[in-house]
Image (cartoon, rainbow, N blue to C red):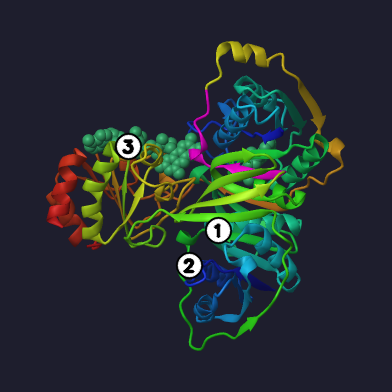
């Protein structure tokens, strides 16, 4: 069984976001970039399936600038076997990403695509669902448990109000939620080994897919500030404020 | 220019998030229809028909739609799409599961999780866990939108109910099969719509302490319980209590954060609450930057005292 894991290079989750003063976007220059946390979970799940003998090959794929190769190397260091970089300098929309991934799924013929439920930069939460629809493969989004047996996979997913379990025929698309696993840290020897694993480069423009954006970003602004609150020095003072000032009790 | 809203329900009750999506649709304007697809879901259609300003409610009552699976639902929406400019739903785990498929099959981008309607084709949506807000203009012929429920009011009920029209559609045989659903339980108010939310963080230390400290406070306030990711990951609270960037987004009248430091990912889910109370022993905790009332105290002393004095 072959598993394809799309990984996105994003601003590290621990870096404070700053909006550019001219409203043209978010400051990214010289800031720490990392693999999207949900995609780390996806890589971990795929590598675990390979270690268990269920999967035979794990391929990580990223669509982005030359530096996305670093993100792919982290995936390789976690245990993926090889990598594909679809190179583009443009920030593509989820629909264009899904179309490129469909193309890659066509050439690689994976049995399973495991990807993040959400990129923590655009917070779109749509690429996996789109890929499933374009491929006409079944989907199980927001997975917290994945069990492969033969030609089917059983997935428990996190939904509002509890958990839902689905069974899907392969090939299928899964998106990961936070509780699926805890991604490993790559050991130094594995980081060294990853440098020698194959990384193929493809130019996005060479695929003949329309990548033009459909949504026009008019402006990017900082969020509205909350007006500063007050500290209270006792529970009595808190109860008093909630009753007489905030009037929420 | 009209809108089709996908209703969310459990075949018996209309989810309150749907009325929020309708409210947003009324802001961009044009006629609004609601699709209720389910099985034995007549009561849901009736509830949807009562919302103010609805043209008609389409009911697709068929066992194939009983469990709200994404594949058959997206197929129906694409089938109905030629009559509409907008296809929309609330950005709940249900809407997020279905709607991007509809967008992809229509070959358009989805505008995810909007928090404001600027004009009929321009919307605001938070990115980077609410660290920035994008203003987005959709230029496509069809516009697929998910609506952040906590950012909009509920569409009120109107005078006379809209007509309900039965439709049929044979969705292709599903390649994903529903196995089971497990509810997280909890008897209090629903987290997404509660007027008051009490959330606990890592400081609670165990599930037992989470329950024994926060349940009495929540009961006193008639509040829903929520949690930080750290509390959920540690097993103190069920998964679907997580408030934040990647959990639920809530905006109650009163949000009480207990032993939660206030990471940006948590703030993303609660910072639009009307009144925020934070109790934490670390005066430097970032949660105090968004709190209307901050109390620096040990939660194991302050919370029982608060519960008693309310
Ligand atoms: C991709 C990604 C997505 C995420 N999504 C979410 C999300 O949706 N929601 C979310 O909440 N987090 C999310 N997080 C995690 C987030 O970054 C924080 O790690 C998390 O919110 C911390 O939880 P906490 O505040 O309970 O724990 P901590 O940060 O450890 O804070 C515990 C607090 O308790 C206080 N404390 C300890 N003991 C006591 C005591 N006895 N009395 C009083 N105070 C005490 C401490 O001073 C501290 O402020 C996400 C992270 C990532 C990377
Ligand atoms: N540029 C990209 N390259 C590879 N995978 C991506 C890219 N963008 C998004 N993805 C995948 O799609 C998931 C969801 O992203 P989004 O729909 O943008 O929130 C991510 O977690 C990744 O797995």
Foreground of the two, B173 or B132: B173
Tag 3 secondary structure: helix
The residue that mark 1 highlights is B94
Q: Earlier in the sequence, mark 1 or mark 3?
A: 1
Q: Quadrant of ligand 2?
A: top right
Tag 2 secondary structure: loop
Crowdedness near tag 2: few (<14), some (14–19) or many (≥20) residues, C-alpha within 10 Å? some
Cα separation between marks 1 and 3: 28 Å
Residue B152, image x, y percentages: 48, 64
Q: Is residue B49 magenta?
A: no
Query: Which residue is found at the position 45% from the left and 60% from the top?
Result: B150
Image-quadrant location for residue A242:
bottom left
Residue B244, image x, y percentages: 44, 46
Query: Which residue is found at the position 83% from the left and 44% from the top?
Result: A209
Label number found at residue B202: 3
**Mark 3 C-beta to ligand 1 under 8 Å:** yes
Foreground of the two, A247 or B143: B143
The residue that mark 2 highlights is B15
Image-quadrant location for residue A63:
top right
Tell me the chain of label 1: B
Magenta stretch: give its range: A171-184
Q: Is residue A181 magenta?
A: yes
Left or right placement of residue B151 versus residue B113 in this view: left
Does the CB distance between marks 1 and 2 fall below 8 Å?
A: yes
Label number found at residue A121: none
Q: Earlier in the sequence, mark 1 or mark 2?
A: 2
Residue B243, image x, y percentages: 41, 48
Cα separation between marks 3 and 2: 31 Å
């Amino acid at each position: 069984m072959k598993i394809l894991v799309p990984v996105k290079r994003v601003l590290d989750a621990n870096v404070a976001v700053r909006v550019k003063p001219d409203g043209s976007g978010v400051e990214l220059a010289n800031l720490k970039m990392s693999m999207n946390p949900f995609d780390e979970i996806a890589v971990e799940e795929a590598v675990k399936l390979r270690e268990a003998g269920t999967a035979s090959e794990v391929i990580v794929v990223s669509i982005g600038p030359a530096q996305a190769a670093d993100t792919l190397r982290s995936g390789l260091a976690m245990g993926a076997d090889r990598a594909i970089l679809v190179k583009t300098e443009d920030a593509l929309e989820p629909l264009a990403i899904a179309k490129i991934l469909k193309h890659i799924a066509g050439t690689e013929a994976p049995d399973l695509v495991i990807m993040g439920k959400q990129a923590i930069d655009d917070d779109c939460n749509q690429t996996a669902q789109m890929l499933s629809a374009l491929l006409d493969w079944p989907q199980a989004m927001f997975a917290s448990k994945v069990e492969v047996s033969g030609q089917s996979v059983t997935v428990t997913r996190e939904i509002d109000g509890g958990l839902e379990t689905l069974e899907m025929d392969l090939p299928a698309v899964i998106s990961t939620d936070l509780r699926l696993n805890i991604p490993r840290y790559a050991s130094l020897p594995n980081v060294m080994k990853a440098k020698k694993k194959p990384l193929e480069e493809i130019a996005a423009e060479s695929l003949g897919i329309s990548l033009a954006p459909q949504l026009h970003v008019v402006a990017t602004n900082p969020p509205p500030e909350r007006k500063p609150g007050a500290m209270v020095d006792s529970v009595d003072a808190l109860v008093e404020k909630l009753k007489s000032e905030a009037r929420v009790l | 220019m009209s809108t089709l809203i996908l209703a969310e329900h459990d075949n018996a009750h209309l989810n309150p998030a749907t009325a929020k999506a309708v409210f947003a649709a009324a802001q961009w304007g044009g006629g609004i229809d609601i699709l209720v697809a389910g099985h034995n879901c007549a009561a849901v259609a009736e509830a949807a028909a009562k919302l103010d300003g609805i043209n008609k409610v389409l009911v697709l009552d068929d066992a194939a739609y009983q469990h709200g699976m994404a594949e058959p639902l997206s197929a129906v929406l694409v089938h109905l799409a030629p009559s509409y400019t907008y296809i929309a739903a609330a950005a709940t785990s249900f809407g997020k599961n279905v709607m991007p498929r509809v967008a992809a099959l229509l070959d358009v981008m989805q505008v995810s999780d909007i928090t404001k309607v600027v004009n009929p084709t321009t919307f605001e949506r938070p990115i980077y866990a609410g660290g920035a807000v994008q203003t987005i203009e959709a230029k496509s012929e069809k516009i697929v939108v998910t609506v952040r429920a906590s950012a909009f009011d509920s569409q009120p009920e109107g005078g006379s109910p809209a007509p309900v029209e039965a439709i049929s559609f044979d969705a292709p045989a599903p390649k994903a099969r529903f196995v089971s659903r497990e509810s997280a339980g909890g008897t209090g108010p629903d987290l997404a719509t509660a007027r008051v939310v009490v959330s606990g963080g890592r400081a609670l230390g165990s599930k037992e302490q989470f329950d024994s400290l926060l349940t009495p406070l929540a009961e006193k306030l008639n509040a829903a319980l929520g949690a930080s990711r750290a509390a959920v990951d540690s097993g103190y609270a069920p998964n679907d209590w997580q408030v934040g960037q990647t959990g639920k987004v809530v905006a109650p009248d009163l949000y009480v954060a207990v032993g939660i430091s206030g990471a940006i990912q948590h703030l993303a889910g609660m910072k639009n609450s009307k009144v925020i109370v934070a109790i934490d022993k670390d005066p430097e905790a970032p949660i105090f930057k968004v709190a209307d009332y901050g109390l620096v105290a040990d939660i194991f002393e302050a919370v029982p005292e608060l519960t008693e004095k309310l």
